[in-house]
Image (tube, rainbow, N blue to C red):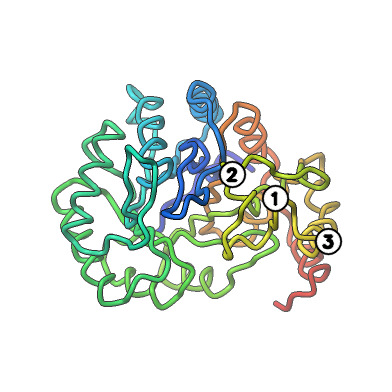
Amino acid sequence: MSTTQTARTLGRSGIEVSALGFGCWAIGGEWHDSSGKPLGWGPVDDAESTRAIHRALDLGVTFFDTADVYGAGHSERVLGKAVAGRRDQVVLASKWGSVFDEAAKTAADEPGLTPEYARAALTATLGRLGTDYLDLYQLHVNYAPLAAAAALRDVCEEFVREGLIRAYGWSTDDPERARLFAEGPHCASVQVNCNVLQDAPEMLALCDELDLAAVNRGPLAMGLLTGKYTDAAVTDKGDIRAVPPPWLAFFENGRVVPEWQARFEAVRDILTSAGRTPAQGALAWLWARSPHTVPIPGIRTVAQAEQNAGALQFGPLTPAQMAEIESLLARTA
């Protein structure tokens, strides 16, 4: 990427971010649902997480995406301490909607979808992050009812007027819901699951139509696209991939599902062109896929920060490579 290509704008907000974000789910450590199933990525070393954040910053990554529920508040606390004194150098995004017990590190079954809960959640998030404003605030309930979402969009506009947030968005894979939030003038983004194996054409078309940023969760397919789980299994019982929920398609009993592995192998040579790692190639696909994409791979070590940031030096895949991937995966344009 050239210098101009290492940055992107968060939709119509005018907020400039690095083309690569830093996903903070994994640095939250372990927490569970009400039945005891893992929702995190296993044990975490807070000191290493902090070093990874600092290394990413040094390499030009400015966009950090977390959520209040990650580690039941722990991710926000670690991130806030890591960027203390450097607030003007970072763009901070968080999410709300999950109800959780920070002390017990458990998430409740039902979300909090009232404007009153949104305000309380935002106040708590600002406290954990140690800041008086958030750059991007995102609803974290994928299929929240439209009526409830309309009220939440309106309260987000209040937050903007009060100077508590600069912009907002919705983490949803449903175009109708994204369009509803986008009716608000300060809606800037949609956070959407998208990667080389799981394209999201409807959502990306919507982002193009409405000038929204597509913040890409799952850009490395929960680790599949790093190539390191070809023969290895995820055995830590605190890792969500060891006991995956139904929506986590790539893993079963801690191992990559063979059909997904086969699809990855079909495009591995293209992803690793020009000396890229598979992960760097997967990020390059997203940058080539749309000018609105901002992938946020999960990072919790200095090595991961360096590898992912290294993708910026290679830039996006070429149109010919993109077309070849579509052909290999038997997708239609």
User: What residue is disc 2 on?
Assistant: 239
Which amino acid type is shown beneath numbered disc 2? Asp
Question: Which quadrant does the C terminus fall into?
Answer: bottom right
Tell me residue 280's x, y (percent).
70, 44
Outermost residue, front side: 35
At 79% from the left and 58% from the top, the residue drawn is 261
| Residue denoted by label 1 | 254
What amino acid type should be assigned to the residue bearing mark 3? Ala
Q: Looking at the image, which residue is at 54% across and 23% down?
A: 48
Amino acid of disc 1: Gly
Q: CA distance from mark 3 to mark 2?
A: 23 Å
Residue 284 percent across, percent down from the top left: 68, 50
Depth check: 291 or 308 in front? 308
> Callout 3: helix, strand or loop?
helix
Closer-to-camera residue (62/172): 172
Helix, strand or loop for disc 2: loop
Mark 3 or mark 1: whose residue is earlier in sequence: 1
Answer whether labels 2 and 1 touch (C-beta < 8 Å).
Answer: yes
Q: From the image, state whether disc 3 or disc 2 is nearer to you.
A: 2
Crowd around label 1: few <14 · some 14–19 · many ≥20 (10 Å): many
Q: Secondary structure at mark 1?
A: loop
Percent across and percent down for residue 318 are 74, 56
